[in-house]
Amino acid sequence: MDYFLEVPVDYFLILSGDQLYSMDYREMVDFAKETNADVVVATLPIAEKDCSRMGVMKIDASQMITDFIEKPQDQRTIDAMRVDDQTKSLLSGSEQCHHLASMGIYLFKRDVLLNLLNEDLREDFGKHLLPTVIAKGNAAAYIFNGYWEDIGTIESFFNANMALTDPNPLFDCYDEERPIYATRHNLPGPKIFNTKVSNSILCEGCIVEAKELTHTILGPRAIVKENTVLQDTYVMGSDYFTPPIESSRLPRQLYIGRNCVIRKAIIDKNACIGDNVQLINQHDLNHYDGQHVSIRDGVIIVQRGAT
């Protein structure tokens, strides 16, 4: 989740990858000015098991980056990138995390970035451009100890969203000092009829006649009919209550029908699920592909616009 910040004109802020985080970029800009680094890389402490899917770096006591490897795979390299005792104290509150990883957020001096893009025509920041800058010796690591999740896989995306239903989620959507800038919906509040609801989020425009919602998120305009049970499910909702025109890309009606049971699923936008449907991963499959339905990381996915 990105917060808008008017970055000073002599800097470029670059965001890459699929991420959910809570960061005040002004602190990163202040750090860039203090260090006078050509590039500041937002970093966070990670456990050893996460090193193979992230860019990992070493730093000195002044937080300047001394080495960087993109997604190291062999154990010897991962061990070599372990934070040493001199810099471990900078990773406050991270006793189980002994490595430092890039968050895919970079603050470049404007002239440095423009020169780099002219000198190095390769396209990947993590694999190509960032090592080039670090090799010149003036790259710094801004250490972030707040909330951050990589949502680049179905499992991580599902878990990050489901965590929002917890009583005190790590990512706070209700912090008025850090508002979330998103599409505004001029929709009525949700209607709920005879439904048992626990640990769930219901967005604007929902009409719910279900039997039970547990650990479930209903996006805008989600409609759930009678006697249906949803557990551990993220329903993304719909762009319309009724599609304005007939289209091969959209069902004629957008709802979840009667007498359904759906567990551990993502229902993508503008889907129609008829009556008496059961979506349950009975055999605990990790991967499956079917017509309009798939499974990734054990999570059932109903595709966008499916019937």
Image (cartoon, rainbow, N blue to C red):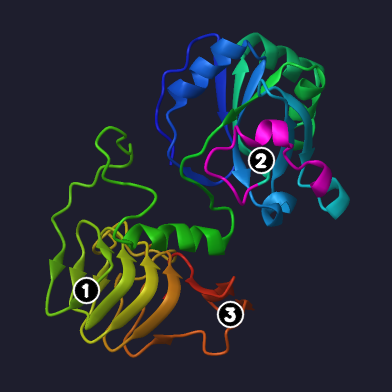
131 left or right of 157? right
Residue 77 drawn at (x, y percent): 85, 46
Image: 89 above or below 290: above
Residue in the picture at 62% in, 77% down = 286
Q: Earlier in the sequence, mark 2 or mark 3?
A: 2
Q: Mark 1: which secondary structure?
A: strand
Is 134 in front, or is 248? 134
Would residue 8 be found to the left or right of residue 172 on screen?
right
Residue occupying image coordinates x 38% and y 87%: 277
Distance from Cα at disc 2 to Cα at disc 3? 37 Å
Picture layout, residue 65 above or below residue 285: above
Reading the chain from its start, which is encountered first: label 3 or label 1? 1
Q: Which residue does the numbered mark 2 point to in the structure image?
A: 101
Seen at 80% across and 17% down, the residue is 136
Q: Which part of the image, by quadrant, shows the N terminus?
A: top left
Residue 306 visible, this orientation: no
Which residue is label 1 attached to? 197
* Quadrant holding the C terminus: bottom left
Q: Give 68 or 242, whichever is nearer the viewer.
A: 68
Type of amino acid under label 2? Ala
Q: Residue at x 51, y 84 (%)?
A: 281
Crowd rating for badge 1 (residues with CA inside 10 Å; few <14, some 14–19, many 20+): some
Looking at the rendered image, the disc whose residue lies closer to the viewer, 2 or 1, is 2
Whole-angstrom CA distance, mark 2 to mark 1, is: 39 Å
User: Residue 306's image quarter?
Assistant: bottom left
Instruction: Tell me where the magenta segment starts and ends, as one range.
Output: 78-97
Q: Position of residue 239 (x, y in %)?
A: 31, 56
Name the spot of residue 280 as percent of width and height, x first: 46, 85
Secondary structure at numbered mark 3: loop
Tell me the residue that label 3 is attached to. Answer: 290
